[in-house]
């Protein structure tokens, strides 16, 4: 159980080292306090010679605590088993300067923070050396640090011996980082710091936080996001056992109870009169029609090289495909939840969140408190995938606790979680290509009708970055390229879903490339290599994956192979899927997936990279084969895992093989880039092996059988 | 008052018969390793053992646990080959579903130490992992299987 005191022990000590991210400026806690900032610290060496590091990035399974701690422990030369990581509370100090916000997303944690955390470790090491040199009265050049100990000749002292004194000395402003050959952890498969507690049931997730005098809350939601509460049967609900209060909040009707089970019991008795939605009755059919019609509208042009329309008009060989991809649900197994405790002069939040700054901001809005009266504490996240960077659930908990003036734990039931929306957007895409007389791809037209994710996130722009990502900035060398974005404006909120726009754009582009390959009688690997002849890193991953998968040979397990390549979040990924199809049932089985990934020259922990790619492949495959949010006449209709099934072990590939290819350039991301290629790789295998064109997802047995007929 | 035996310890609870065991264990007893995922017995995050049999505690009423032995993730020894294998193979990512996975695997190997790959996959396919750690879960169960056979 997490208590406020535990957090204060870490975050509230007035001693310690503070390093602000901007320019690696170093301040002491006292200085921060004098500047009227909250006392916070980045690392601490305890009396028992343990190293505690604060992470400004949320641990949601990607292994960021491990990655960041490795950087500090490596520079500081600290034994790994004595390293601990805690979540940094919300504070300006902990902002990721590149985001201007404390936020975990965009596969950027290590690329944004790796230098900073290395400096942190190197600075602490220098501080210990300085302190030891003064205390022992020995020149620094005669002192050494190793594995948490300071050595003078054959005598050793734990770092903790000097730490308090070190904090009193001026903090070194310039420190040297290690050369790569001196690394003790970086580049190695150091075991994850969070694994033991996750194996023993001790890891604390948001849903596990319990405060004294705490009550529980749920929110009854409308079918469509733009419906508001007009009336509800408050008196009936308040009569039920264990129910403390019921009242409307911004997003629905909040019901508060002594226990969570008392709330579960009352749910089917809640009758709410909702205002009419502007999309009342928009079911699957209506939505599909709506999206496809949007493709007839003129959008905003994101890229226009050459003259695509003219070229396509004039060539003999051309091809056109229309795609329709569904809304997707994040499906974190830990549903949204938040503990909020609002008193007359303070607000405390404990939650699994990816966006601390935004959480603090919404709490400030609701309570009217200053920043320094709103504490936001991050727990482990039972899955994030982008969903937990949306902080509306935090706002709800704050609204409820504010009314009750006592600690409240808001939990979304699974049905609430699906119904709350913020999905990966549905989208319709038309792709056209023109080939010259030699079969070369000389013109590519891409138009997508899709909601604007960034606009829902409060950052509107003419061209929504997510809408065209992976297409607008693709590396395929084609002389005429047209990319157009038609904004879909429906009151169905959308959000960042692992790999965001690339989750759909890679599917349309990469399956389309294979259609072009067939039309021009080219091998898909060969065609890609030709189109990417100016990009060595892209070529490397494609060649690696082709070789490792045995491209061109008979598949080992499946009946057909498909390839896809995609660049996203600074990382190149190519995947080959070995697939077979049972034509009688329509069941697609993916037997083996081979991946090659180039995330730049530095790989901090190879096993974390492999784990993230395995994860991304399975999540991408889950979406490809099974997932779609369905809408009935009254909103989202498949509200739990029985009707929104996700991939299970028997459906996962028997083998996922990951090859890390080291490339030049800057550090790329790894949490998301493994996802986009899998769906098109599978669809391409079906295209070549079974002559099936998959232009819609998911590839459910029914849909596949329909395509066979 | 109802008496419950969880991980070898006795607890008294004053709750109605139909309270789902999940909330008894998590909120009233305070053992939070067992997780809430779907509330319908689909995802497996809330799996516990009732007299050795894996059950979905979110749909199991309290009355069914009286006079029975409950084991949760906290009740499986930390040096158990399954937990060791889970660490060795670095299985968890977000970790949320892993308690349920480990409890299920514990029952699986207890019932049939010689479970084949197909049997393992078939049983474990009733558990959802959104991080997609399936390949490592499978390997960890097989690793634990061989450790258990070796260590007896």
Image: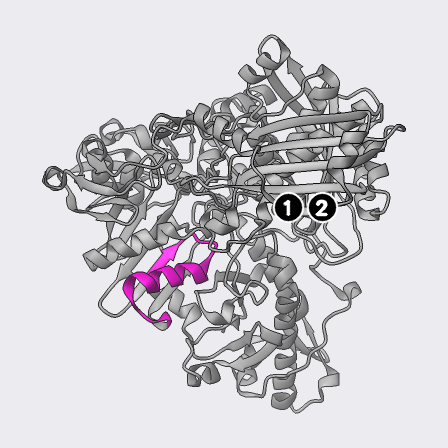
The span shown in magenta is A348-371
Q: How far across and how far down the image is residue A134, in percent?
A: 63, 90
Q: Secondary structure at mark 2?
A: strand
Q: How far across and how far down the image is residue A167, in percent?
A: 53, 83
Question: Which residue does the image show at 49% across and 26% down from the upper left?
Answer: A289
Disc 1: which residue: A301
Image quarter where the N terminus of chain A lies is bottom left
Which class describes the residues within 10 Å of circle 2: few (<14), some (14-19), or many (20+)?
some
Q: Quadrant of residue A177?
A: bottom right
Q: Quadrant of residue A484?
A: top right
Near-viewer residue (A328 or A448):
A448
- Asked if residue A362 lies in the magenta stretch, the reply is yes
Asked whether residue B43 appears in the rendered view, the answer is yes
Answer with left or right where residue A434 lies relative to residue A509.
right
Near-viewer residue (A212 or A166):
A212
Q: How far across and how far down the image is residue A155, in percent?
A: 67, 78
Outermost residue toward the right in this view: A438
Q: Are marks 2 and 1 in contact (CB under 8 Å)?
A: yes
Label at residue A323: none
Answer with left or right where residue A676 lies relative to residue A703.
right
Q: Secondary structure at mark 1?
A: strand
């Amino acid at each position: 159980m997490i208590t406020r005191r535990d957090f204060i022990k870490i975050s509230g000590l007035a001693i310690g080292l503070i390093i602000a991210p901007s320019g690696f400026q170093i301040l002491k806690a006292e200085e921060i306090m004098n500047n009227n900032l909250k006392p916070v610290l980045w690392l601490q060496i305890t009396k028992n010679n343990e190293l505690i590091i604060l992470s400004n990035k949320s641990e949601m399974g990607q292994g960021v605590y491990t990655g960041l701690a490795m950087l500090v422990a490596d520079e500081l030369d600290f034994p790994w088993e004595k390293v601990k990581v805690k979540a940094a509370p919300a504070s300006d100090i902990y902002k990721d300067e590149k985001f201007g916000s404390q936020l975990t997303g965009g596969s950027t944690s290590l690329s944004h923070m790796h230098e900073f955390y290395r400096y942190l470790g190197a600075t602490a090491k220098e501080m210990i050396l300085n302190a030891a040199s003064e205390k022992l009265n020995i020149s620094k050049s005669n002192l050494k640090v190793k594995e948490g100990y300071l050595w003078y000749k054959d005598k050793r002292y734990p770092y903790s011996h000097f730490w308090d004194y070190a904090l009193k000395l001026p903090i070194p402003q310039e420190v040297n980082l290690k050369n790569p050959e001196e690394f003790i952890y970086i580049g190695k498969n150091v075991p994850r710091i969070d694994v033991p507690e996750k194996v023993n049931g001790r890891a604390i997730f948001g849903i596990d936080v319990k405060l004294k005098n705490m009550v529980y809350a749920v929110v009854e939601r409308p079918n469509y996001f733009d419906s508001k509460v007009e009336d509800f049967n408050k008196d009936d609900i308040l009569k039920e056992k264990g129910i403390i209060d019921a009242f409307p909040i911004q997003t629905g009707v909040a019901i508060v109870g002594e226990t969570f089970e008392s709330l579960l019991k009352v749910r089917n008795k809640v009758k709410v009169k909702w205002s009419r939605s502007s999309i009342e009755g928009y079911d699957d059919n209506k939505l599909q029609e709506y999206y496809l019609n949007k493709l007839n509208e003129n959008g905003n042009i994101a890229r226009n090289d050459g003259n695509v329309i003219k070229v396509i008009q004039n060539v003999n060989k051309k091809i056109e495909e229309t795609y329709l991809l569904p809304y997707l649900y994040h499906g974190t197994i830990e549903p949204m939840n938040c503990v909020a405790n609002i008193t007359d002069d303070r607000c405390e939040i404990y939650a699994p969140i990816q966006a601390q700054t935004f959480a603090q901001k919404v709490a400030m809005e609701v309570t009217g408190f200053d920043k320094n009266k709103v504490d936001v504490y991050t727990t482990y996240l039972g899955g994030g995938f982008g969903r937990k960077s949306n902080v509306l659930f935090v706002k709800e908990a704050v609204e409820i606790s504010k009314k009750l003036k006592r600690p409240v734990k808001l939990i979304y039931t699974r049905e609430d979680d699906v119904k709350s929306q913020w999905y990966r957007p549905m989208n319709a895409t038309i792709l056209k290509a023109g080939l010259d007389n030699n079969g070369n791809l000389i013109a590519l037209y891409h138009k997508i009708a899709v909601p604007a994710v960034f606009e829902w996130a409060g950052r509107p722009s003419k061209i929504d970055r997510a809408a065209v990502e992976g297409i607008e900035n693709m590396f395929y060398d084609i002389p005429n390229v047209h990319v157009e974005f038609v904004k879909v404006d429906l009151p169905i909120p959308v959000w960042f879903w692992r790999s965001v726009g690339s989750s759909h754009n890679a599917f349309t582009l990469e399956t389309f490339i294979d259609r072009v390959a067939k039309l021009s009688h080219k091998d898909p690997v060969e065609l890609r290599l030709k189109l990417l002849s100016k990009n060595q890193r892209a070529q490397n991953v494609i060649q690696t994956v082709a070789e490792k998968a045995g491209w061109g040979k008979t598949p080992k397990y499946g009946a057909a192979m498909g390839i896809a390549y995609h660049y996203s979040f600074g990382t190149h990924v190519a995947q080959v899927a070995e697939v077979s199809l049972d034509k009688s049932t329509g069941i697609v089985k993916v037997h083996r997936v081979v991946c090659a990934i180039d995330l730049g020259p530095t790989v901090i922990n190879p096993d974390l990279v492999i784990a993230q790619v395995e994860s991304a492949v399975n999540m991408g495959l889950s979406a490809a084969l099974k997932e779609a949010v369905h809408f009935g006449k009254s909103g989202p209709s498949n509200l739990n895992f029985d009707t929104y099934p996700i991939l299970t072990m028997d459906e996962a590939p028997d083998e996922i093989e990951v090859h890390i290819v080291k490339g030049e350039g800057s550090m790329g991301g790894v949490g998301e880039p493994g996802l986009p290629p899998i769906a098109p790789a599978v669809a391409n295998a079906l295209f070549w092996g079974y002559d099936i064109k998959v232009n819609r997802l998911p590839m459910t047995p029914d849909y596949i059988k329909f395509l066979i007929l | 008052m109802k008496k419950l035996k969880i991980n070898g310890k006795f607890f008294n609870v004053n709750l109605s018969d139909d309270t789902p065991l999940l909330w008894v264990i998590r909120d009233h007893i305070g053992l939070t390793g067992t997780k809430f995922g779907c509330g319908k017995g689909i995802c497996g995050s809330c799996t516990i053992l009732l007299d050795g049999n894996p059950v979905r505690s979110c749909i199991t009423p309290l009355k069914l646990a009286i006079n029975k032995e409950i084991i949760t993730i906290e009740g499986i020894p930390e040096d158990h080959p399954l937990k060791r294998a889970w660490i060795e193979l670095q299985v968890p990512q977000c970790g949320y579903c892993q308690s349920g996975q480990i409890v299920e695997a514990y029952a699986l190997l207890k019932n049939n130490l010689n479970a084949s790959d197909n049997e393992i996959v078939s049983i474990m396919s009733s558990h959802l992992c959104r991080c997609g750690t399936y390949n490592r879960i499978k390997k960890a169960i097989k690793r634990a299987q061989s450790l258990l056979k070796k260590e007896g």
